[in-house]
Image (cartoon, rainbow, N blue to C red):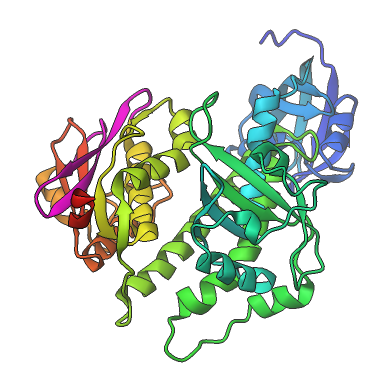
Amino acid sequence: MDLAEPILARAVSDALDTLVEADEPLAGLQHSCGGEIPGPIAIPELLELVRRARRYSFRLARAIHAQDGSENITAWVEVDPCIADGGCEIILRSWQSAPVVPDDAATVLSRRTLLDREMAELSALLDADQRLLMVNPALGELQSLGTKMTAGIGQPFTDFLAPQIHSAAVLHWRMLDGAPVAIEGSQRPWRIVLVPQGRPGADPSGFELLLVSDDPPPAASVQDAVAPQVSAGHGLVGHDLAPALRQPIARIVANAETIRSRLAGPLPDAYADYAAEIANAGRLLLGLLEDLSDLEVVESDSFDTAPDRIDLAEVARQASGILSVRAQEKDITVVVPAQDARLGAIAEFRRVLQVLINLIGNAIRYSPEESTIEVRLERDEHRVRVIVADQGPGLSAEQQGIVFEKFERLGRSGDGGSGLGLYISRRLARAMGGELSVDSTIGKGARFILEVPADLAADKS
């Protein structure tokens, strides 16, 4: 920057980083970012620059970025901590603006889907014919509905949710997506959200069903939720604490995502980053609550599974379809068993699905972009297997020996994991009379192998 360039504006801050006075256009930008004069500096990157200048007692200069209504601003600012009371002189030497480029329709849709997922108070997985595969636990007003839907696994979800559309005979998912629905026992308006699973352009391999209300729950129910009572014979986290905290934390995450995604209006990049940090922290806490809840279940003396005759190939395809969007974000190809592939097993459908979602999700998380994950099937006389093979960094012999231990994360940090997923998955596999193991070589990826009893009767049919 040529320091001979004329000064466009001046401003002064005090020792508390209050913007005491400012010329235009800095004054206008301060107001656009939600601040006042005098008032705390509301321009995030300017505030950070002022703080550094005061901390180091050194004159600093750099370009800052902000958003002023519908324009992106780039400005060259010098900050000199020369004011006697500990404040700074702020000098603006250049100012460039460019129109904010609106997001494309696909990006907006993706963000709205993310918000709906955070706001959902009941969620379920459906097959390609919109039949219920798995229902996640619900609470409050939706607890009774969730119980009925869980008991109705295999039925169309519309048997339990009657969309308020002109013709109940219209069942195409695009007509049902966004349809209003009334819930018995609730005064709030609800809407159905259907998120198709599978590759874009192809017929959906299944759906994620979300039940969303844009109105918050009644204050009384929220107050009851955050003051759970420990019930005799039940764990604190899974039975009481997790359901109570899930809804308010999900609301925090959803509101932070609304801010981050700028769906509520323009926002400087730095503020959007702060909102993203809040949302990510909330998701980490939600994931930890879910894992701790599952941990209590699998470690309880009364835990058992409900084995049934299932098609292991179909469960593998369903799990891969559920995670297809996450894989596409990293340009990862997930190779799944062919549609006509069949492999009979004796196991509990939702528990096998839970394990495979964990295995495939981990493979996506730790695999490099543009790599391939293969989900393949094997069997011998009495056992059947699903193998999830990735092209990630692989595990050493020492890591393979501890990867299934409780809270083990192999030294990873910041990946959002709790270190409980594989421990819980192995407990589930063994409860079904099976096993979960790993085979890996450093630099050559990892193979996680889920093994369960074969359905011998299926061979004779």
- Say left or right for 193 vs 243: right
Q: Position of residue 410 (x, y in %)?
A: 25, 50
What residue is drawn where x is 60% and y is 55%? 157
What residue is drawn where x is 70% and y is 44%? 176
Can residue 371 be spotted in the picture?
A: yes
Looking at the image, residue 334 lies above or below residue 214: above
Q: Position of residue 31 (x, y in %)?
A: 88, 37
Q: Nearer the viewer, residue 398 or 431?
A: 431
Residue 345 within the segment the image draws in magenta = no
- Say left or right for 223 vs 376: right
Looking at the image, residue 389 lies above or below residue 228: above
Q: Residue furthest front?
A: 461
Can residue 51 be spotted in the picture?
A: no
What residue is drawn where x is 69% and y is 71%? 141
**Total numbered labels:** 0
Magenta extent:
368-395
What residue is drawn where x is 50% and y is 88%? 231
Q: Residue furthest bottom?
A: 232
Residue 386 within the segment the image draws in magenta = yes
Q: Nearer the viewer, residue 37 or 247?
A: 247
- Say left or right for 188 vs 345: right
Tell me the quarter of the image containing the N terminus: top right
Q: Position of residue 123 (x, y in %)?
A: 58, 56
Q: Nearer the viewer, residue 274 or 193?
A: 193
- Say left or right for 356 vs 441: right
